[in-house]
Image: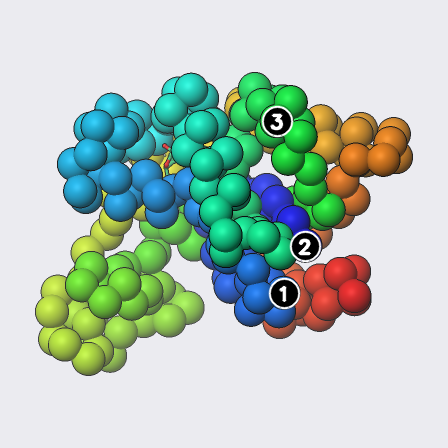
Amino acid sequence: MRIILIGAPGAGKGTQANFLTNKFKIPQVSTGDMLRSAVKDKTDLGIKAKGYMDDGGLVPDNLIIDLVKLRVEMKDCENGFLLDGFPRTIPQAEAMKDAQIFIDFVLEIQVKDEVIINRLTGRRIHSESGRIYHIEHNPPITEGIDDISGDPLIIRDDDKKETILKRLNTYHEHTEPLVNFYSKWSANSDQNSPNFISIDGDDSSEKINEILNKILK
Ligand code: AMP
């Protein structure tokens, strides 16, 4: 099972990715996670990528494409994988097609910009454990403090409002065209075309799970 998840930042790709990777026992290949770890380790890639990431833009295609090609050839991807955050541009999608890395399902999670802005600006993180809170939907017991460790919570750099607005712009400009790319290819129904499915991401994550369970039976 090979799956691509498409959706704006904050659309809930992470939650659905967890569900799908457990269901199909496939690894999650998240280019965002790979890049964050490269930045943390100050590798060549990390040093080159950091500025683009902090700014809410995209890391250049040539830095990403080979990284993903190598990753999906690894042994744990033998029975499939879930791509989260890749492809993010038409050239990235074309590069995958050219490399004959074909996909079974492309799932788009659609959420309105206003909902995303509310979700992300309210997000608070405990950086050491990765625990995530939301000031309205899942607040900590004491404002600004992690429930378990008592450490102060932080706002991730890319969850700051101006960065979110830039990331949404980047999404609409560069990534949303993939919806057309994959839905057209899927309608072609050539031998290698993926199934393209669009899901309403305003629904609760349980409802979305239910829908995905039905579709991906
Ligand atoms: P994410 O966690 O998927 O939102 O990714 C965080 C940041 O990493 C993005 O805002 C981009 O700057 C960069 N990034 C992740 N995946 C890609 C990609 N496929 N192409 C270009 N940049 C990416």
Image quarter hosting the C terminus: bottom right
Name which of mark 2 and mark 1 comes first in the sequence: 2
Name which of mark 3 and mark 2 comes first in the sequence: 2
Residue toward you, 183 or 65: 65
Q: Is residue 68 above or below residue 97?
A: below
Q: Residue at x 19, y 80 (%)?
A: 148
The amino acid type, in three-letter code, at marker 1 is: Phe
Query: Which mark is on residue 1?
Result: 2
Task: Let me know if residue 187 appears in the view.
Answer: no
Instruction: Report the residue marked by disc 1.
Output: 24
User: Quick check: which quadrant has ligand 1?
Assistant: top left
Q: Could you say where residue 198 lies in the image, as x and y percent from the top left? A: 72, 46
The amino acid type, in three-letter code, at marker 2 is: Met
* C-alpha separation, residue under disc 3 versus residue under disc 2: 18 Å
Q: Is residue 70 left or right of residue 57?
A: right
Name which of mark 1 and mark 3 comes first in the sequence: 1
* C-alpha separation, residue under disc 2 versus residue under disc 1: 7 Å
Q: Residue at x 69, y 42 (%)?
A: 103
Is the shortest distance between ligand 1 and the CB of mark 2 under 8 Å?
no
Query: Which mark is on residue 99?
Result: 3
**Mark 2 burial class by Cα count in 10 Å: few <14, some 14-19, many 20+:** some
Where disc 2 sits, the SS reads: loop
Q: Is residue 97 above or below residue 22?
A: above
Comparing labels 3 and 2, the label whose residue is closer to the camera: 3
Q: Could you say where residue 216 lies in the image, as x and y percent from the top left? A: 75, 61
